[in-house]
Amino acid sequence: MTDTDFTAEDFEAAKSWPFQEARSLIKRLDQMEKQGKPKDGPVVFETGYGPSGLPHIGTFGEVARTSMVRNAFEALTGRPSRIVCFSDDMDGLRKVPPNLPNQSLLEQNLQRPLSSIPDPFGTHESFSAHNNARLREFLDRFGFEYEFVSATDAYRSGRMDDAMMRMLEVYDEVLDILLPTLGEERRATYSPILPISPTTGRVLYVPLLERDAGTGDVVFEDEDGSRATINVKGGAAKLQWKADWAGRWYALGVDYEMSGEDLTESVRLSNRIVKALGGTPPAGFQYQLFLDEEGRKISKSKGNGLTIDQWLRYAAPESLSLYNFTAPKKAKKLYFDVIPKTADEYRTHVEKYEGQEGAKALDNPAWHIHRGDVPGVVPPVSFGLLLNIVDAGGIDDPAVLRGFVRKYRPGASEAEMAATEPLIGYAINYFHDFVLPKKSYRAPTEQEAQALGILAETLDGMSGEEDEGTLQTAVFDAGKAVEFKNLRDWFRAIYEVVFGQSEGPRMGPFAKIYGPKETAELIRGALARTHQEGGTGA
């Protein structure tokens, strides 16, 4: 199904959050037109990047979510748009990240713009050039459409000149917005315009002693105590955070930008500043930050979160897009245990898409993840089921796993089997890294041992041609035969005794793909192990 298969009514009826955000942007553009400030040219979406560190999972999330809103906006309006990925590479380096090489080199360049600091890796002309290149490789790897903009290029090329001159004109008004938010000591020296020392090249956090809004000249005290004069145009100065964000919106004509909930106050102040400049604040929303397994906010410095490469060792990038799509305004835990579930949810969404129509299809996350071009093929098995096969038999031979899949889904097409290939690798990686180290088998109670024996005998007598429902019923019947009061306890016993974990597969599909006789042997092996280790539990 392509976008040409949808009607205008379908798009208007779509309710998923990217469409809601797109409508918020449309409303902003309509208001601008009514105010006599119609938008000329493509509508501009922006994401920001701080190149003092490498791209991370938050960078992915912001670009992915912004792309989803842009896609929905273009579907609703047909208007051209572009995404600007803005690198703040003219910021001064305030501290040296501990995980970088050549620490002494970076220490010697503190407070200098990132684009003026030698590359500690020795591969590019500057520190920021190295990280900007990594950012672009990162974005290209995931197929994002974007226009890269360097702050250094924007300032030095004159692209920010009008914003700098306008900031001088409304300097006092901007101070009135920002000074009440600062401590007493910082208020005494604060300036929204930061000169760059003509002698040391460092970004200076000093007050402006004189300023001329007509010429752009400003006077300040340089690091050696002398009075220096520069012109704010051409990259001899830059805007300080909050003022810089507003100045960027003003200079680039940004119409939409989202941000983390930790920047709520910054957004509020930057909105006021861009209005003072004569611009219109962009539409956008604050998303919630990810949490670690303990419910703490993920921090790059603490290293308590997942990296992109870690996620991609265990699941496809589309699953990471789904994790970012789902409930962006809700704080969610981001740790390894969420990966299998998210991978299978992605497969389910793609599988459902083909049978959906109208707004229901447009609200399917797969439509947003694939920008309307949803693949028509999914693996014939779920990640969870494949992982359970790897788990049950300790199997890490891809050829053997392919055989299990063929046995379970004999009618699977070559395309479906090809789609299974990466899934096999992900399952093997996840099993070795997370499942195997945590395995802990326990002895069954007498009741559990009796039920397991009955189940093994029943499965052993089956041909293998039975469907999943019949196999699942056999499991239920074994639990009922020994009068389990709560069949949940019976299933938990299977997982803990046979699989060595507290949760496990739905047994019908598992026995179908693994084979009923093989499953019976697995159960008998667990009972034999228990016997060798000292019998049943109390």
Image (spheres, rainbow, N blue to C red):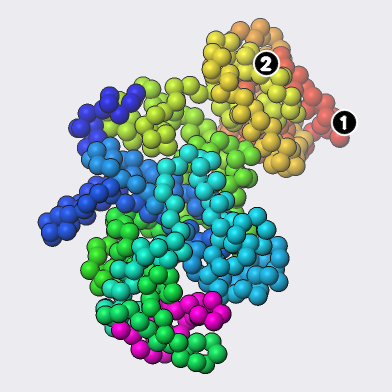
Q: Amino acid at mark 1?
A: Gln
The C terminus: image quadrant: top right
Q: Which residues are magenta?
A: 184-212
Q: Residue at horizontal 50%, vertical 92%?
A: 226
Mark 1 burial class by Cα count in 10 Å: few <14, some 14-19, many 20+: few
- Residue 179 position by quadrant: bottom left
Point out residue 444 in the picture as x, y percentages from the top left corner: 74, 33
Residue placed at 69% from the left, 41% from the top? Answer: 434
The secondary structure type at the circle numbered 1 is helix
Q: Which mark is residue 532?
A: 1
Query: At numbered mark 2, what does the secondary structure look like: helix, strand or loop?
Result: helix
Work out whether residue 468 or residue 103 is closer to the camera in this orientation and state it.
103
Where residue 373 appears, as percent x and y from the top left, is 39, 29
Q: Nearer the viewer, mark 1 or mark 2?
A: 2
User: Magenta stretch mostly in which secondary structure?
Assistant: loop
Relative side of 400 to 93, left or right: right
Q: Is residue 26 left or right of residue 54?
A: left
The vertical placement of 63 against 297, above or below, is above
Q: Inspect the magenta stretch and tell me whether residue 46 lies in it.
A: no
116 vs 95, nearest the viewer: 116
| Residue highlighted by disc 2 | 403
State the residue at coordinates (20%, 32%).
8
Placement of 236 over or under 533, stated as above or below: below
* Image point (22%, 28%), residue name: 7
* Distance CA(mark 1)–CA(mark 2): 32 Å
